[in-house]
Amino acid sequence: MRFSFAGMNTLADPASFDPKKGQCVDICNCDLDDEHNAIRRDGFSLVVAGDITSAWTSKDGVTYCVYSGHLCTFDGSAVTVLDDDLTVLPNCEFEQVNDVVVFSDNVKIGIIEGNSATLISHPSDWVDVEALETWVTSHYPADPAKWNGTTSNSNFEVDAFKLATLAGKCLHHFGGTLYLAIDNFVYATKTHNIEQMDIRYNVVAGFADPVTMIHHGTNGLFVGTEKATYFLEGGGIVVDESGKLQAGFTQAQVTPYGAIYGTTVQVHAGLIPQLQAVGMAVLWSTRVGVFAGLPGGAAVNLSADKVTLPDVATGTAMFKEHNGLNQYIACFSTVAWVLNLVKGTHSRFTNYPFTSLFKHGSGYYGADSHGIFRIEGDTDYMGVPELAQKIDAFVLTPSTDFGKKEKKYLPALYVQARCDCELAVDYFVNEQLAYEDDVILFDDLASAHTLRSSPPRGMSATFWQFKLKNINGSAFTAFNLEPTVTVATSRTR
C-alpha cells in the first residue's frame, strides 16, 4: 500500500479513510500538484515596509493600495502617494471601469484617472423641490424682446432625478453600470455614467442580511450576503418599448451559505474539470467551503465532503498560476486555505498573515501591517528580523489497519521524496503518538530518492498512522509513503 497526498479531508473520521484514495488528515504549508505530490510552499520577503492595506491590481496591471490613509500606487519596489490631501479608510476597494478606476472606502467614493484621484461630487444635485425651484427662478429665459429673432437654450438642463453616486462596498462593473452594496441593498449607477445614480432606479435588489459580494456571471450578478448567496439574472436596468426604465433582474437563491467578504475571484471555468463548463467562473469562500458560480447562475461547492473553512466575516483571496499549478488561495487572519483547481485538492498554510493578496507583473504578493511582501524564498517574514522564521511543513496520513484486524509490525516505511536537507517521520499507533523524529537525510533537492525510516523494533498495533515533516524548514517534494507490514500471530481483542 502506498500513501499519496490527494488533499485534506477534515470531515471524515481519520480511521475511516480509504488510504487508496490518497486523502490525508492534514497537509500543512504544502502546495499540492496535479500528481498528488506535496511541495513545501514558498516563504515571503519584505519589499516595502509599513502598514499597507487594500492592495489590488487593475486589468491594466497597475497596483493600488492604501498607506497611512493615502491612496498609493505600487510599482514592485515602492509605493507612491497619489494625493497628499485626499485621505481614505484602511479598507478601501478599487474597481476598473474602462480607462479609469473607481475607489470607495464605504464613506468616500471617487475616481482615479492616470495619477490623479478625485472625489465624486455634483453641485447640481437637488436634495428637495425648493432647491430646484430656486435654480429655475434664477435662470428664467431672457426677455423675449431682446431675442431679436434668435433662439435661446432651454433653462432646464438639470436632471431632477440625478443623484451623485453613493459610497459603498463590493464595487463591480457590469454591462456599463457600476454596482455597489450599501448595507442590505445593491445599488446601481446610471448606465455608462458611473458618477451618477437615478434616484428612481438606483436600488436594484434588497436582502435580509448585509451584502458581502457582487460579481457578474455570463448573464447576471452573483450577490452574496452574510447568510446566503443569490443570482440576479438579467442585464440590470433596461428601457422598455415606451422608453421607461425598468428593473431587468430576476432573483433566486443559489446557496444557503453566505459569502465571506473579500474572497471573490474570477477564473476560466475550463481550469476546473469538475465543473464541465466553459466561459468564466466566479469563486468565493463560505464557511462550508469554496463555491464556484457557473455562467448560467448555478453554484457548486468545490469543497463538498472534504473540508470546511473558518466561520469568519472577512478574508482575502487570489488566483495563483505558478510552476504549473492553478490555485485559489483564500487567507483568513493568519491561516490560508489552498485549492488546487484542477484536482480539487485542499491544503492549508499557517503563519500566512495577509490582508491583501495580489499579482503584480509576474510576481505574487501579500500585504499586512508590516508591509508588502513578495511570495518567494525559504523563509517567512524575510526582512523583518524579529518575525523571520523557517517554514514548518508536514503531511499527516489517515489511520489505517491495512485491511486486517490483526496487530501488525512495521519493519520499514519507505519515503520517496526530494529534499535539500532532512525529513523526519512521526509514528502513531492506535491513534496515539508512539515514536517521533525519526530523521532521514536526503540532502538533494534536484533528484528523487526512496529512503527508509523505521520505528523501534517490537512496536505493534492494529492501526498505524504517519506524519512526514521537514526539519529546519527544509524544502521538499514528497511523492509517497510506502510501509512494509508484517501481521502478528495473535489477533486483537
Image (cartoon, helix red, strand yellow):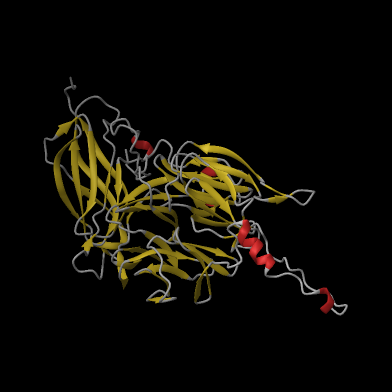
Specify the quadrant that holds the C terminus. top left
In the image, 158 versus 472, the foreground residue is: 158
**Residue 296 location, x and y as percent?**
62, 44
In the image, 85 versus 310, the foreground residue is: 85
Q: Residue at x 56, y 60 (%)?
A: 165
Q: Give the farthest residue toward the right.
A: 149
**Residue 408 location, x and y as percent?**
20, 31
Q: Give the farthest residue toward the top.
A: 493
Using the rendered image of the protein, determine whether residue 85 is visible from the camera's viewpoint: yes
Residue 126 relative to residue 476: left or right: right
**Residue 351 location, x and y as percent?**
27, 56
**Residue 434 location, x and y as percent?**
14, 38
Using the rendered image of the protein, determine whether residue 376 is visible from the camera's viewpoint: no
In the image, 362 versus 38, the foreground residue is: 362
Residue 456 relative to residue 123: left or right: left
Residue 308 relative to residue 233: left or right: left
Task: Determine which quarter of the picture holds residue 443.
Answer: bottom left
Q: Residue at x 29, y 54 (%)?
A: 334
Residue 411 relative to residue 243: left or right: left
Specify the quadrant that holds the N terminus. top left
Q: Residue at x 49, y 71 (%)?
A: 62
Say how many tags the image has.
0
Up the image or down, 306 lies above or below 176; here it is above
Up the image or down, 253 lies above or below 137; here it is above
Task: Determine which quarter of the picture holds residue 107.
Answer: bottom left
In the image, 175 versus 245, the foreground residue is: 245
